[in-house]
Amino acid sequence: MTGMTAARTPSTSPADRPRLGLRERKKIKTREAIRAATYALVREQGYDATTIDQIAERAEVSPSTVFRYFPTKEDIVLTDEYDPVILAEIRERPAGEPWPDTIRSVLHRAVQLGTSEDEEVSRLRTHLMVQVPAVRSRMMESMSATGRMLCAAIGERTGRDPDSLEVRVYAMSLIGGLMETSMYWAENDHRDDFTALIDRALDVMEHGLPGENR
């Protein structure tokens, strides 16, 4: 989601983890191998110098396999497995909980999942969002898919029409705010605590600019 989480399959306890078939386990293993190869090559030689052929060779797959899993090189950097997890977390929150509290709690959980898996990858992804125009452009394109997911979640949670203008504006405002938060974090050398930055962003979206006359 908006590049803020490490691109790993989320860790769950054995009791909670669904039993995957061999085919799905092999797909996950292949995706992770492609991502790991990409991150290693980017660290070694930079993003622009890293090619799909090099990624395929490092991951021990064919270039066509890379493209089957990730349509573009940018997708390798940006795609993660967390949108379904976030949707599930929203559904599991207490029914009477105010929506702002729900989204704050869920985003805290998303940050915890991402940075606990591999904080270095989280930093690399957000750094590339800032430094590489192609990654940033692809991130903007992918926001619509995450926005649709969030609209559906808001609709389920609040009883509102997920296609209504109000829900769509709110969802995309949230997605855009999270993207800007990720970029701010990277632009400032990842000095700040990312969860604290998320809270600041949510405060602005909930209450407006600090000190603003209302």
Image (tube, rainbow, N blue to C red):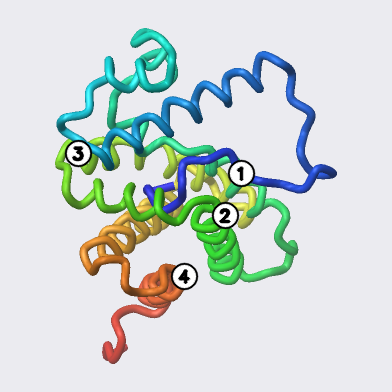
Q: Which type of secondary structure does the marked residue at label 4 adopt? A: helix
Q: Amino acid at mark 3?
A: Gly
Residue picked out by circle 3: 46
Q: Is residue 167 left or right of residue 137?
A: right
Q: Residues within 10 Å of mark 4 (few under 14, many from 20)?
A: some
Asked if the residue under mark 2 is in contact with the one under mark 1, i.e. CB atoms within 8 Å, the reply is yes
Pick the quarter of the image with the C terminus. bottom left
Asked if the residue under mark 4 is in contact with the one under mark 3, i.e. CB atoms within 8 Å, the reply is no
Check the image and report above or below for 18 versus 209: above
For marks 1 and 3, give the CA distance. 27 Å
Asked if the residue under mark 3 is in contact with the one under mark 1, i.e. CB atoms within 8 Å, the reply is no
Residue at x 40% of width, y 53% of height: 120
Asked if the residue under mark 1 is in contact with the one under mark 4, i.e. CB atoms within 8 Å, the reply is no
Residue at x 31% of width, y 72% of height: 191
Residue picked out by circle 1: 10
Q: Position of residue 50 (x, y in %)?
A: 22, 28
Of labels 3 and 4, the one closer to you: 3
Check the image and report above or below for 179 versus 32: below
For marks 4 and 1, give the CA distance. 18 Å
Question: Which disc is residue 90 wearing?
Answer: none
* Extreme residue toward the right, this view: 15
Q: Which type of secondary structure does the marked residue at label 2 adopt? A: helix
- Can you see residue 165? no
Q: Amino acid at mark 4?
A: Thr
Q: Which type of secondary structure does the marked residue at label 1 adopt? A: loop
